[in-house]
Amino acid sequence: MTDKKKLLPLIGLQLSVMLYAFTGYFTKMAARESFLSLRWCMFYGGMIMILGIYAILWQQFLKRFPLSTCYASRAMASVWTMLIAFIAFRETITWNMILGALVIITGVYLVVTADE
């Protein structure tokens, strides 16, 4: 298998983890609305839809990758969530958060490359 054929499914796995990270965005947006209002229901409905899509994608990636690769990649949700919060809500990213993100990225890289 060529490197490109290995890389594309890993990118897909990360995109699905990024999709999962957007549940935090929808949850925070819903928290700003009145309970059971139309907008609250729409945001929570969006979150549930994302979780459903992610569950289907997760099952497909479990077929394709070792379990260790999939679960290590889920740790990237913290990094994606941090970036989404920075972009969407202008939340502050501290040096400790950057250091933590680098540790996560390094760990995921080590697990993924060890499975080859």
Image (cartoon, helix red, strand yellow):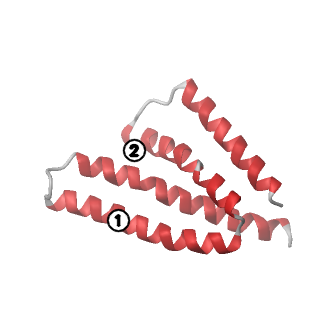
Front residue of 86 and 43: 43
Mark 2: give few (<14), some (14-19) or many (20+) Cα within 10 Å: few
Q: Amino acid at mark 2?
A: Ala
Q: Position of residue 103 (x, y in %)?
A: 67, 36
Q: Is residue 75 left or right of residue 33?
A: right
Give the residue pinned by disc 2.
88
* Number of the front mark, 2 or 1: 1
Label 2 or label 1, whichever comes before in sequence order: 1
Viewport quadrant of the N terminus = bottom right
The vertical placement of 24 against 49, above or below, is above
Q: Position of residue 50 (x, y in %)?
A: 41, 65
Mark number displayed over residue 29: none
Q: Amino acid at mark 1?
A: Ile
Q: Is residue 95 left or right of residue 38?
A: right
**Label 2's element?**
helix
Q: Position of residue 28 (x, y in %)?
A: 31, 47
Q: Which residue is painted at 55% across and 43% down in the image?
A: 79
Q: Which residue is painted at 66% across and 36% down in the image?
A: 102
Q: Quadrant of residue 74?
A: bottom right
Q: Position of residue 62 (x, y in %)?
A: 63, 70
Q: Residue furthest right?
A: 2
Q: Do the residues bearing badges 2 and 1 touch, measured as CB atoms within 8 Å?
A: no
Front residue of 103 and 46: 103
Give the residue pinned by disc 1.
48
Viewport quadrant of the C terminus = bottom right
